[in-house]
Amino acid sequence: MIFAILPLVGSGLIWAPGAVYLAAQGRPLAGALLAGGGVLVVGNIDTLVRPFVVRRYAKMHPFITVIGAFAFVPLVGILGLLVGPLAISYFFELVAMYKGEYLHENDGSAVPAAVLEAGTPTPQV
C-alpha cells in the first residue's frame, strides 16, 4: 500500500512481484491474469487518472512526489514514503499562503494584503 503512493511505478511494485510469484508457484494463468490486469487496468488508471487528480487538487507535479518520497526515507525510514510528499506539498502551500498574504504582486514589497486592501498608507521601510 505504501509503494502505491509513488506515481507511475508504485502500482507496478505491487502487482508485478505478485504475478511473478504466482507464475513461479505453478499458476501461470493466474500470474498472467494478474499481470494483464495490472498493466491494462491498474496501469492505465495510475497513468491517466492520478495526474488529473493530482494536478487538479494538489497542484503538484508527480515528480515532486517521487523526490519527496525518496528524500525522506533516509530521514524517517519507510514512513518517509508517505511523509515526504506531504511535507513538500505543505511547504509549497505555506509559500503560496505567505505570498498571498504578505507580498504585493505588483512590486514584490513585503506589505500585508489587508493593508493594501484597506487603502491606508503603507509605512516606508
Image: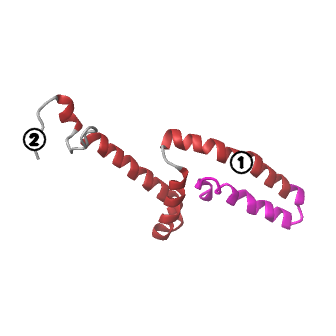
| Residue located at (43% from left, 55% from top) | 88
Foreground: 79 or 90?
Answer: 90
| Residue located at (49% from left, 59% from top) | 68
Q: Amino acid at mark 2?
A: Pro
Counting residues from the start of the chain, the first of labels 1 and 2 encountered is 1
| Residue denoted by label 1 | 42
Mark 2, Cα crowd under 10 Å, few <14 / some 14-19 / many 20+, is few
| Residue denoted by label 2 | 123
Q: Amino acid at mark 1?
A: Val
| Label 1, label 2: how far apart the Cα atoms are | 57 Å
Figure check: 102 above or below 23: above
| Residue located at (56% from left, 41% from top) | 53
Mark 1, Cα crowd under 10 Å, few <14 / some 14-19 / many 20+, is some
| Residue 70 painted magenta | no
Residue 118, percent across and down? 17, 29
Boundaries of the magenta span: 1-30
Residue 113, percent across and down? 23, 36
Visual colour scheme:
secondary structure
Foreground: 41 or 112?
Answer: 112
